[in-house]
Every structure is written in structure tokens, then in C-alpha cells.
Amino acid sequence: EPEVTQTPSHQVTQMGQEVILRCVPISNHLYFYWYRQILGQKVEFLVSFYNNEISEKSEIFDDQFSVERPDGSNFTLKIRSTKLEDSAMYFCASRPDGNEKLFFGSGTQLSVL
Amino acid sequence: SQQGEEDPQALSIQEGENATMNCSYKTSINNLQWYRQNSGRGLVHLILIRSNEREKHSGRLRVTLDTSKKSSSLLITASRAADTASYFCATVRGSQGNLIFGKGTKLSVKP
């Protein structure tokens, strides 16, 4: 069964460094999302992406964050200058047109030291 | 505004018992979805119930929806140790299918 894949599974970085989290959505999906989950807390929406542009973003998704779909398969989340509070599990999700169900990847655990 | 707040926050039961989790939301919805998350893993879609439906079944799962009370419940019957996970309800915000999740119920099923 097709699945959303995320790399790396764990990322450790120093505060102030840039990180890029990578996702390969399911191939025929058209809508892409990033969520994050701070340990023990709720899953929070960051951004949605459709037709090669951001369709919606939350208040968490400030100027430090950006997303890109550089080719036909990858979907990336960049954090320009990481802060301690960016430490969280980041989930990528996708869905096809006409289906409201989201398919999630296994996540990237980001630790900012 | 927050959508999809579950209760209880944690639930511990014995294998074979039924588990009921509740979810409340604040705004009008087209559908409500339930997801499951095993520890440290991604979320897996369980079931979707539309606003014009009152009850839906899928295997050992039963979901109800009361739009007048803005609430939903997820019942897992004859629970198994493998059902141990966190369960989240989610509602859609906006036109792009963005899901807003509640805090979840952490279910522990003891063998």
C-alpha cells in the first residue's frame, strides 16, 4: 500500500541552524500538509499546500518557516533559524482530490539543542 | 478557536472491555474524523462521519455524532492490547481540508 515517507526520522540541530525536513507524499495526491506535535501535546496544523502554493497557514507558521515542492515527488519544510521551542515531531500528510481523509507519514523528530 | 476536544484524557481498561472516548467541537462541520496514533508514530485514519449521519460502524469501531450537542463518541468494542494508542478526533477548517485535532485520549488496554 502506498505511504507517505519522511526523512530523516530523527534530526538533532543546534539553535539558530537551518533544517530541512523532507517528505514524499503519495504519488497521486494533490493536497499536502505539515503538522507538528510537541511531546505530549496536541497535533497542530502548520501549513497546507496545493497547486504549488501555500493555501493556508497557521499562526505558528511564521517567517522562519517555508515549504517547497521542488520536483514532482518531494515536499519539504524548512526552518531557517531553529529555536528551542521548535523541538517537536513534524508530520507530513497528503490526500487525493475528492477524499477528505489524510494520510500521514511516520514523522521526523526534531531536537533543537 | 479550538476544535475537537476529547475526553477523557486517559483511559485504562482490561482486554475485552469496551472503550468509549468523547469529542466536542465548537463550530459547524461537514464531517468529523477519528485518528489513531501509536506511540511515536504517525496518525492513521480510522473513520469519518458526515454531518448528516448519526452513527457509523467499522469493524469493532462505532462512531456517533450529535450535531445539536456538537459532540461525537468513538466506541471500541471487545478491546485488545493492540488497541493501546492515542485517539484523536479532528474537524475540517477551511476549504483545503485542513484538519484541526483535539488533544486526544490516551487508551491503555491491559492484557
Image (cartoon, rainbow, N blue to C red):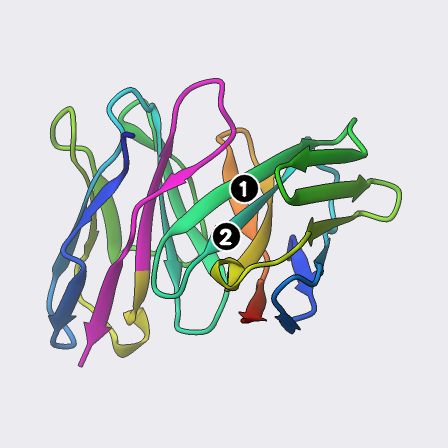
Tell me residue B37's x, y (percent): 45, 56
Residue B100 visible: yes
Q: Quadrant of the N terminus of chain A?
A: top left
Where B108 falls versus B62 (above or below)?
Answer: below
Marks 2 and 1, Cα distance to the nearest angstrom? 7 Å
Amino acid at circle 2: Arg
Instruction: Say which element carries label 1.
Output: strand
Mark 2, secondary structure of its residue: strand
Give the label on residue B36, or none: 2
Q: Is residue B31 visible?
A: no
Q: Residue at x 58, y 67 (%)?
A: B107
Rendering coords of residue A63 (x, y %): 28, 55
**Residue tagged 1:** B46
Q: With respect to residue B62, does A88 lie above or below? A: below
Q: Tell which of B47 and A40 is nearer to you.
A: B47
Does the segment drawn in magenta span residue B9? no
Q: Residue at x 72, y 34 (%)?
A: B56
Residue B83 vs residue B33, the one in the foreground: B83
Identify which amino acid the numbered label 1 is placed on: Leu
The answer for which chain carries disc 1 is B
Quadrant housing the C terminus of chain A? bottom left
- Residue A39 place in picture, x, y as percent: 39, 73
* Callouts 2 and 1 close, C-beta under 8 Å: yes
Q: Is residue A92 left or right of residue B65?
A: left
Quarter holding residue A47: top left
**Pointer 2 local density, CA inside 10 Å: few below 14, some 14–19, many at least 20:** many
Magenta part of the chain? A90-113
Q: Is residue B57 left or right of residue B67?
A: left
For this orientation, the residue located farthest to the bottom is A113
Q: Label 1 crowding class (10 Å Cα cut-off): few <14, some 14-19, many 20+?
A: some
